[in-house]
Image (cartoon, grey):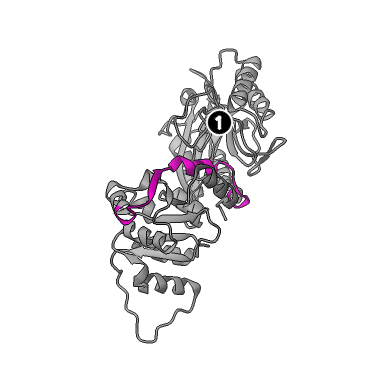
Amino acid sequence: MYLNEARARGLMADFGFDAIIASTPENVTYLAGTVGWSNKVYAYSVHMLAVFARDTGVASALIVPGQEVTYVSAQQSWIKDLYTFGGKSALIQPPGSEAQTAEEETYLGLYNDDGKRGKNPGEALGLALKARGLTRARLALDQERVMPNVRAQIEAALPDAEIVDAADFFRLIRMVKTPDEIAALAAAAEVNEKAATAASNAVAEGATEREVASVFAAEVGRMGGKWQWFHFCSGRRATGIFPPTDKKIATGEMWKFDAGVVLNNYQGDTGWGGVLGEPTKAQLDLWKATEEGFEAAMSKVKAGVLGSTIHRTMLEATRAAGLPEHNGNFAGHAIGLEQREVPYVLAEPAPQGSPFLPESSDFPLEAGTTICVENPCQIFGMGGTQIEKTVVVTETGYEPVYPQERKLWVV
């Protein structure tokens, strides 16, 4: 189960919430374990909701749009009390038809149970909460994917409930990962690592940046993931996260990339760099400073450390190792169902302005937080490189989410 039940219930008690309601694809996955398609594709018109109560005696519920009935049936969420809304899709059920699998049983149950079918998402949610005695409850609503018309439906269905906009409350819960979440992040990291390795192996004299990027995209797709970005650049362009172009890679040039993928709604983020041909002393020196700054920062990672400490250590060590003018402004970020989770950046303090998150962005990391630590270094006119790894914070240090060797990649 992705959901950290104990943490969720503890925080719900702290903030006085009787139930939480997920709306974003990420938070529905977090609560229900399912991965939708329509709430991604039809981002502002299809609503899928999940309910989790603080009371252990109250079952969770899933409100399923018509487009997701088949997918929820196939995926078999741990949540078994299912509601739907709207009209029914075309389906002829010959007399005597019976379900022969769990998938068919769930499918027909959702299709035929008119007692759990609302006119719209808000009414279906109201049915679920009424069945749980939560119509007068204090509810934490993940509001970020609730359109105004559906918000009005929810308020009409639950006139006596106290509904609190609480998307950041979900982020607070999700800061500390469960073992199943770490396994999901490891699977995404594996896809990213293997696809990036294949792309790096495609670097050659005369190959274009786009050709290298196409290898990455094909490998991600072959492994069942979806690529989100592949910032690949070479030569003078390797001084930031420029997109790949038809520029041909030439011998003697540095190249670097930052790559992001998603697998079952869990994110992967990685990066490294290399040289086509024998590296020069200046290129080796740049890599050395990048590596020493990165390793110094990693030595600080453990429960209780501030993000600013990781950042300052990286900055100071990179400068001391031969890049005195290096001016990196952050050292990474948390990752999970979103590419950037809390803390959004490992950097100098900034106010967060949320009733559910620490006042400052610079707060002690908890064990179980998953972070990407990264040190991009670049010199205009010469190029640059990068090291990025994903780790789980522990009480005494960290553990890799997936094996990630980092070296200057010489082709």
- Which is more toward the observer, 146 or 235? 146
Residue 201 spot, x, y in % from top left: 57, 40
Residue lying furthest right = 396
Is residue 157 a member of the stretch shown in magenta?
yes
**Region of the chain picked out in magenta, as a range:** 156-181
Within 10 Å of disc 1 (Cα), the crowding (few <14, some 14-19, many 20+) is many
Image quarter of residue 116:
bottom left
- Which is more toward the observer, 28 or 388? 28
Residue 13 spot, x, y in % from top left: 54, 46
User: Is residue 183 rendered to the left or right of residue 165?
Assistant: right
Q: Is residue 215 visible to us here?
A: no
Q: Is residue 323 visible to us here?
A: yes
In the displayed structure, would residue 148 be above or below residue 283? below
In the rendered image, which quarter contains the N terminus?
Answer: bottom right
The residue at 56%/58% (across/down) is: 56
User: Is residue 50 rendered to the left or right of residue 290?
Assistant: left
Residue tagged 1: 332
- Which is more toward the observer, 257 or 46? 46
The residue at 66%/34% (across/down) is: 303
